[in-house]
Image (cartoon, helix red, strand yellow):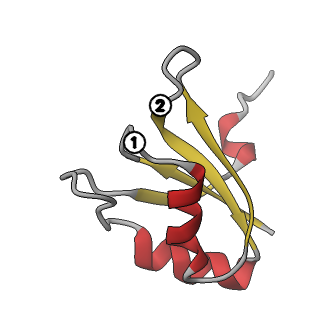
Amino acid sequence: MKKLFISNLPADATEASVSALFAEFGTVRSINLVTDIFSGKCKGFGYVEMEGHEARPAQAALDGKSMGDGDRTLRVRFDDPKASRGRRR
């Protein structure tokens, strides 16, 4: 299972629209969009989990692609939880 980090999502992005975008490449196991607590709109990023052999072509095809009618291009990266942790000494 691979977790993809997606950024530059439009504010009107929904779990259904992002899931449909990634479903072209395989089964979306889980999706988590970060939303504003007051408005409920997407804050512009989220996570999608897919099987590794499906996630790789999805990342390659969707990175740099625009979603919706906006001029923002998606950034799709593999999530690396080890890189986000600080090192203790």
Give the side of residue 1 with respect to residue 35, left or right: right
Instruction: Give the SS element for disc 2.
Output: loop
Q: Residue at x 41, y 56 (%)?
A: 75
Can residue 56 be spotted in the picture? yes
Q: The residue under label 1 is which amino acid type?
A: Asp
State how far apart marks 2 and 1 are (Cα). 6 Å
Give the side of residue 52 with respect to residue 7, left or right: right
Q: Is residue 22 above or below residue 79?
A: below
Say the numbered circle drawn on residue 12.
1
Front residue (pair 1, 71): 71
Say the numbered circle drawn on residue 42.
none
Q: Are marks 2 and 1 in contact (CB under 8 Å)?
A: yes
Front residue (pair 8, 23): 23
Task: Give the quarter of the image for residue 78.
Answer: bottom right
Residue 35 x %, y %: 56, 30
Q: The residue under label 2 is which amino acid type?
A: Lys
Residue farthest to the top?
38
Name the quarter where the C terminus is drawn.
top right
Q: Is residue 44 above or below residue 37?
A: below
Name the quarter where the N terminus is drawn.
bottom right
Mark 2, residue position:
41
Task: Give the quarter of the image for residue 51.
Answer: bottom right
Can residue 77 be spotted in the picture? no
Q: Residue at x 29, y 62 (%)?
A: 66
Along the polypeptide, which appears first: circle 2 or circle 1? 1
Instruction: Give the SS element for disc 1.
Output: loop
